[in-house]
Amino acid sequence: MLKARAGGALPLVLALDSDASTPLHVRIGDALRAAILERRIARGARLPASRVLAEDLGCARGTVLAALERLAAEGYLTARAGSGTRVAATLPDDLLPAAGPSEAASPPASSPPALSRRGAALTRAPRHAYLAAPAAPDAFALGRPAPDAFPFAVFARLLQAEWRDGAPPPHPLGDPRLRAATAAYLSATRGVACTADDVIVTAGIRQSLRLLAHLLLDPGEAAFVEDPGFPGIALALVEAGVRPVPVPVGPGGLAIDRVRAAAARTRLAVVTPAQHYPLGHAMSLENRLALLAWAEAAGAWIVEDDYGGEYRYASRPLSPLRALDRTGRVIYAGSFSKLLLPALQLSYLVLPRGLAAPVHRALAETGPAPSGLGQGALARFIDEGHLGRHLRRTRNLYAARQAALLAAAGRHAAGLLEIPPLEGGMHLVARPGPAWPAGLGDVAAARACAEAGIATVALSAYHADPEAAAPGLLLGYAAVPERAVAPAVLRMAEALRAAYARP
Amino acid sequence: MLKARAGGALPLVLALDSDASTPLHVRIGDALRAAILERRIARGARLPASRVLAEDLGCARGTVLAALERLAAEGYLTARAGSGTRVAATLPDDLLPAAGPSEAASPPASSPPALSRRGAALTRAPRHAYLAAPAAPDAFALGRPAPDAFPFAVFARLLQAEWRDGAPPPHPLGDPRLRAATAAYLSATRGVACTADDVIVTAGIRQSLRLLAHLLLDPGEAAFVEDPGFPGIALALVEAGVRPVPVPVGPGGLAIDRVRAAAARTRLAVVTPAQHYPLGHAMSLENRLALLAWAEAAGAWIVEDDYGGEYRYASRPLSPLRALDRTGRVIYAGSFSKLLLPALQLSYLVLPRGLAAPVHRALAETGPAPSGLGQGALARFIDEGHLGRHLRRTRNLYAARQAALLAAAGRHAAGLLEIPPLEGGMHLVARPGPAWPAGLGDVAAARACAEAGIATVALSAYHADPEAAAPGLLLGYAAVPERAVAPAVLRMAEALRAAYARP
């Protein structure tokens, strides 16, 4: 608080912001404006001469002049030759905040803000552990590829090469080079015959689904989702005004009878045929063909989320639905973030021929959504063969890490956790064994693990009706080095056994 | 087309995909599956021995075995010791597509797809020139910062440094370092006192608005937008189910009477006070205070899009609404993409205190939207002073480029275009002069310019009622080197005069 000498007419207390990183003239101007707004200086009042103000504030006259000049430009002050600087008389008095100096210092909006109903719902929704990723520990967080396997130095070099001489403006459909590289990769390794024209780049499966739901369904329409299934899929549909209809999943995939029974009213189904997420088994050929036949008969669309289709350890990957689709009802979705590194935030859709043109038009309207910043570098990464090398390396790595988790669980959690091996993917599903504490729910179990520094997700959280779900814990292993597996399993087993003793 | 010798029981024509980039065993498997699905091979039929098939196809036996193994895994084939390989008998016949071989070769979905009503509307909307950015020429495209001013080598070096040793996982609120750097930048240069906790990183103004509209408004509610205004703002609101209510903009900003009259039913206003977009003038202090008073009284929110607030050539920037806001109703929005490079696709919101916690919760749910790929590098860029240097450099550069455009227009388009100088921003608004061809609308004029390789946007496209709008052309100059300005103006003037002669 600096007290200005009553130079001309004005005894004035200026409350200067003490943050020295803000230039002094800005702080003086802000304090002066605050004084005007708080009516501590009357409309039309004459200010002390700038020389006097500078003396009182202990700063250069130029500093004061800069502050006065800004407030004059803003309409708070008028300067006229001969009559000095005055507070503007034309300030709309009735609109001036009536706050006194004491209230003026209070922080804005201390009362809870008025959110919309959907806003309140959105901020009240239960948080899943996978969303708290930045702070979560590594073992056994879900959906994480091995960070130690990613060739950072290579990617850094490609990023620099890409940016050194300029960067192309973002393209609404994705960098054409990345679309071409993705098409080549999918054709060669996933049996998805496509060209760059069929591919669009997105920021993730959720953005992909929002786009498709907007284009293909009207608000209030329904879409089939798998139960259990990734909650983000249902959430993306809800965000687009679409009602997710959970369909139970058995060992062979979606309960196709439920799909057929509801067919007339539902024109979209989102499935994970390569490896059901989160249960991990593949959709049977019968179910694949039945689902395709349903889509054809109902004029419906199938979004095939090929999450993890790249990772099969025991046998060859099955052909994707897209390869079986003869009438263009399947939209194939994949992700580089899951395959390489979450920080890439790049996914893709392969559109059937008939859908490419309207999606292109829609994207030209809504503008580029996925960042173009790394797309060129990723295209080079694929073209230079680094993706193929990464896949071969991580297939072996993840198979070894799955084996390590199974071995450690057999040694340290026998009877407590029953973990069947899975043929692919990046996580396992642990079910309660006979030694599982009686009455311990999986949400409480996951919380107990989290308190011990182990990130797991309760399987019931992936069910439409968590109360009715068989309990389980989802254990991501891809990002956990083999030497870290056994200690983590030990900690988890201790935490679970201790959870037994609690009230 | 390869003809297989009738080795065991099966005369078989396999239509192999001719794309040599697909491994041969994949192509053989795909062709065999197609033959099964098309009933060219009956259920239960025995296949020729793999040795025979390999001979016929002119490939190694291992290649054929790989193809057969995959189809067996998929359930199409059964292999039993002694009886060879057969087409599975358990294939669900009724679900098999009945397509014959001729139809099988046709591309998927040649008929137009069934979009939803909103999907059809989304793909039918008129395309604005600014959205066709990738193919558009440089002079005088809108919303483009100078690519020649961006220090690519510096940013490339920072990207490499950031990625060489790993990259942090994406953070739902944005990289904490970027949030801190943004807060420091805004506090120092824009008079927006804030901390890292108040800042969230977004992928652009449209994503920012979608998020805010979801949180603050329910579907069917209304929000004020400026008329004229950036169509992307209204579109983002529509995408969130919110009804944009255009409010006419005069020289001092929004027609505040219209805002007041509708206040009870409208709880959000999106404005560009620093420089109205696209007209370029600043909102008067009276209007700023009146708008704040309205928001306070109505419990409404103001989104202050400070687009271009950094660029003022003739006088100091006015204080943002955010600096006048005493009750936490203002959400301040800015963009690094506009300031530095579109390829960054990074923007930000500064939230009032009361809104930070719910937005954080909502973002933790919806997951990270802006790419984290360049956020660390951008934070370093700001921290090392490159942003400040870039701003000082481009302020002079853009002022010179605006002057060059005004001079060239005076020389080559006198009477045709009347272009008042603007105190800030990155574009000018050209109005038809007396020599403007009679009856020429601005949309037709923009089209004529586009055909001559000059990108302009018709001002009427920014109006809620284009028919009633005064015509004009928006000319972005920031990305146009001075030497390129006069030739571009000449081409534009020629194109406009020639447009006169047309029927």
Image (cartoon, coloured by chain):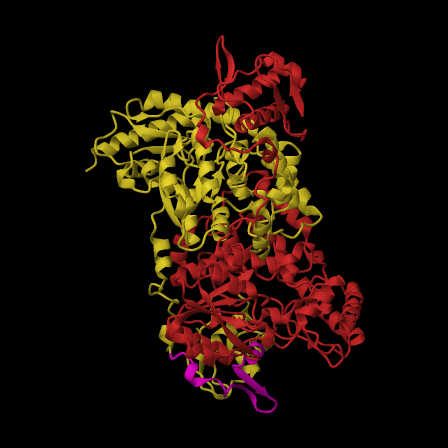
Chain colours: A yellow, B red
Q: Is residue A392 left or right of residue A257?
A: right
| B364 versus B53 height, above or below | below
- Residue B329 at x, y percent in the picture: 42, 68
- Residue B495 at x, y percent in the picture: 77, 68
| A9 versus A386 height, above or below | below
- Is A75 magenta? The answer is yes
- Tell which residue pokes out farthest to the bottom in this image: A82
Q: Quadrant of the N terminus of chain B?
A: top right
Q: Is residue A156 left or right of residue A406?
A: right
**What is the span of residues highlighted in magenta in the rendered image?**
A69-98
- Residue B117 at x, y percent in the picture: 49, 57
| Residue at image point 76% right, 71% down | B502
The reply to whether residue B428 is in sight is no
Q: In which quarter of the image is the C terminus of chain B?
A: bottom right
| B186 versus B37 height, above or below | below
Query: Quick one: B370 or A107, which is closer to the camera?
Result: B370
